[in-house]
Image: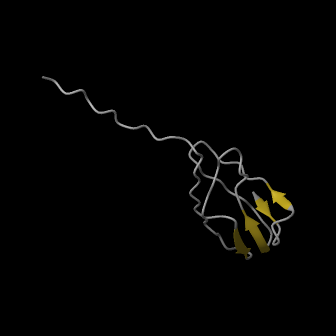
Amino acid sequence: MVYNKSGKTLIQQIHIDSEARYVVLLRPGTYTVDINHIGMDYSEDVPKQVVIQSEITIRLGTKIDTGGLLPQRMPLPMLE
């Protein structure tokens, strides 16, 4: 999600592809980037202010915890 500098007005919703990539084209200015916090989504990386300049590419990597459980290895039973 891209908001204005204050983080109050939504400028553009970001659509992430199947490989977790996205591209956002913005006019020069200062913006606040955040996640949409659906369900248990959480990230320590955002909200974050970014300054966009003409003809400059900005890369912003964000780790998102979706609240899902990672598969755990079950201990094998002891054979006697």
Q: Is residue 14 above or below residue 54?
A: above
Lateral position of residue 43 relative to residue 50, left or right: left
Number of labelled discs?
0
Which residue is most to the front?
A: 80
Which residue is most to the left?
A: 80
The one of 69 and 59 positioned closer to us in this rendering:
69
The one of 67 and 60 positioned closer to us in this rendering:
67
The one of 25 and 80 positioned closer to us in this rendering:
80
* Residue 42 at x, y percent in the picture: 63, 54
> Residue visible at 80% across and 57% down?
12
Q: How is the image coloured?
A: secondary structure
Q: Is residue 28 above or below residue 1?
A: below
- Image quadrant assignment for residue 29: bottom right
Q: Is residue 48 above or below residue 42?
A: below
Lateral position of residue 45 relative to residue 53, left or right: left
* Residue 27 at x, y percent in the picture: 80, 69
* Residue 63 at x, y percent in the picture: 56, 57
Q: Is residue 27 above or below residue 37?
A: below
> Residue visible at 63% across and 45% down?
17
Quarter of the image with the N terminus is: bottom right
- Image quadrant assignment for residue 79: top left
Which residue is most to the right?
A: 9
> Residue visible at 71% across and 48% down?
15
* Residue 38 at x, y percent in the picture: 71, 46
- Image quadrant assignment for residue 68: top right
Quarter of the image with the C terminus is: top left
